[in-house]
Amino acid sequence: MESRPKARAGSPGPVAAGVPFITHENDAPMVPLGAQMMQVVMDPEAGGSSRLTIGRSHWPAGGAGQPHAHEGWEEMFYVLSGEGELLAGEQRYTLKPGMVVCVPERVPHCVASVGRDGLEMVFLLAPGVPGRVLSPAAAARPGEGAEPGGRTGQGGGPRS
């Protein structure tokens, strides 16, 4: 069985070289970002997809994000467990397990956990953005850290 290819900082990564990139959620730290715990599992800098960022977020019961919008990317959520609410523009939407939501770029939105067990979701950003754009702590992998003076979020940066 072959080992999982890993990228070096600054390299195009195995996907760009035509090699599949396989990772596991246990390889990425869960870090705090506002009211949520967030985990960036694969992003363009980690050497996975050059076009997508995927991760997981956990909102504790009663946790809520701040309204924000993204310039240059859209955000999708796949609800794994719990109950939540999405405020997008002036509209409120209920979030339940199995639902998939796509928030277009420039649409102000925020997420809140309204159930007693918290809210667990997978998020996808397209096009992909480096995890350090989401949160400098999210980019910290064993032996690495966020680049000093690195790119900051666009349009307030993702916070949901």
Image (spheres, rainbow, N blue to C red):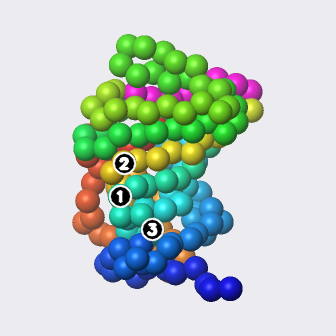
Q: Which residue is pictured at 40% across the width and 27% down the height?
A: 109
Q: Amino acid at mark 1?
A: Arg
User: At 74% across and 32% down in the image, what residue appears?
Assistant: 117
Q: Within 10 Å of the Cα at label 3, are there few (<14), some (14-19), or many (20+) other Cα atoms? A: many
Task: Name the quadrant containing residue 121.
Answer: top right
- Mark 1 and mark 2 in contact (Cβ < 8 Å)? yes
- Which residues fall within the magenta stretch? 109-116
| Res. 129 image quadrant | bottom left
**Type of amino acid at the residue the image marks with label 3:** Gly
The magenta stretch spans residue 89: no
Place of residue 43 in the rendered image (x, y in percent of width and height, measured from the top left): 43, 62
Specify few, some or many for label 2: CA neighbours under 10 Å numbering under 14, 14-19, or 20 or more.
some
Q: Is 8 on the left-hand or right-hand side of 70? A: right
Q: Earlier in the sequence, mark 2 or mark 3?
A: 3
- Give the left or right position of residue 155, taking residue 130 as reference: left
Judging by the rendered image, the residue that carries numbered circle 1 is 51
For residue 149, which quarter of the picture?
bottom left
Amino acid tagged 2: Ala
Closer to the camera, 99 or 39? Answer: 99
Query: Which residue is painted at 56% across and 23% down in the image?
Result: 85
Q: Position of residue 72 (x, y in %)?
A: 25, 44
* Mark 1–mark 3 CB contact (< 8 Å): no
Mark 2 lies on residue: 126
- Residue tagged by mark 3? 48
